[in-house]
């Protein structure tokens, strides 16, 4: 292959994979189905490989298609970051971003790194604490924006994505076999704690709280040491924990909602740009405002 890859062809290719069809991909990139088909043929001719299996009922990638998909996503991300950096007006300022330590550790580092690369003159101050405390700080206008876990009594927020909850135990220990079930949980008011206890109660399973921790680090310490079972969001699963489920005698858990909040008195352009960037990068799909509570 001697020619450079065409970004528009890669964008169409990724759109087909993400939407599951030529027609839906066409709506996403603004092209007709024949044009989409032509673009994929051009891309296959360009790389000299077949990208989709010859199955008219279901679109599925070939091995070469799967390999190209990884490159395509990376190239599109860099392309879009570069466009955003040079098309957006220069913004400066200080932004106080609140978030639980779990999100700051597991889902925000890459997002903040990319934002800072595009907007080097924005200073970001992180304030990490539980969502209930962040919501109170927002009401007092002490922080600008906050990515937090939704709770029923929170005011309206912008839905970012839903994150499944998972029962976890440490590798090399089996606390799930003990009776009553030993638990490591966050303090009262935690949505994780509420869902865990409600699910166990509905299943008629006996439990005992053995550890109460105010942070994900504390929960991890209890789990890694084999002291208890806990509940983590899927984004916080690390290699030295085991995921448990119904086969282990534990009830199914619901998902939580990650929401973006802004302070009441209005925010700066820098804070709004950061809020929109986080929502766009972490969102399952195009985010929308939802009534919470």
Image (cartoon, rainbow, N blue to C red):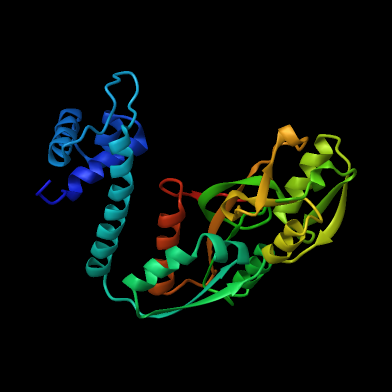
Q: Residue at x 33, y 18 (%)?
A: 57
Q: Residue at x 79, y 46 (%)?
A: 174
Residue 10 percent location from the top left of the image: 23, 45
Q: Is residue 100 visible?
A: no
In the displayed structure image, the side of residue 125 where residue 187 appears, left or right:
right
Residue 134 percent location from the top left of the image: 63, 68
Residue 252 position by quadrant: top right
Position of residue 23 relative to residue 211, above or below, is above
As drawn, which residue projects farthest toward the front?
172
Residue 59 percent location from the top left of the image: 32, 27
In the displayed structure image, the side of residue 205 where residue 20 appears, left or right:
left
Position of residue 125 relative to residue 113, above or below, is below
The front one of 143 and 203 is 203
Q: Is residue 199 visible?
A: yes
Residue 256 percent location from the top left of the image: 62, 48
Q: Residue at x 55, y 56 (%)?
A: 259
């Amino acid at each position: 292959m001697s020619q450079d890859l065409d970004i528009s062809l890669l964008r169409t290719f990724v759109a087909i994979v993400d939407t599951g069809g030529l027609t839906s991909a066409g709506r996403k990139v603004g092209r007709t189905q024949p044009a989409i088909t032509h673009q994929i043929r051009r891309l296959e001719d360009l790389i000299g490989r077949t990208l989709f299996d010859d199955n008219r009922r279901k679109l599925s990638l070939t091995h070469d298609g799967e390999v190209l998909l990884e490159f395509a996503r990376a190239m599109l991300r860099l392309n879009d970051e570069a466009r955003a950096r040079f098309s957006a007006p220069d913004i400066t300022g200080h932004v106080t971003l609140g978030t639980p330590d779990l999100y700051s550790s597991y889902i925000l580092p890459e997002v903040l790194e990319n934002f800072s690369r595009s907007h080097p003159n924005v200073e970001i101050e992180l304030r990490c604490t539980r969502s209930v405390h962040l919501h109170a700080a927002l009401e007092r206008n002490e922080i600008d924006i906050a990515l937090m876990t939704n709770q029923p009594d929170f005011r309206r927020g912008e839905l970012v994505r839903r994150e499944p909850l998972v029962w976890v135990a440490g590798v090399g220990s089996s606390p799930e076999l003990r009776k009553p079930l030993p638990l490591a949980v966050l303090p009262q008011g935690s949505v994780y704690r509420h869902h865990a206890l409600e699910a166990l109660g509905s299943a008629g399973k006996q439990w005992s709280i053995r550890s109460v921790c105010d942070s994900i680090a504390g929960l991890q310490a209890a789990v890694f040491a084999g002291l208890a079972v806990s509940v983590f969001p899927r984004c916080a699963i690390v290699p030295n924990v085991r995921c448990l489920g119904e086969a282990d005698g534990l009830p199914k858990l619901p998902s939580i909602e990650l929401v973006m909040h802004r302070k009441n008195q209005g925010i700066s352009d820098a804070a709004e740009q950061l809020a929109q960037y986080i929502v766009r990068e972490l969102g399952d799909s195009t985010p929308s405002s939802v009534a919470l509570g």
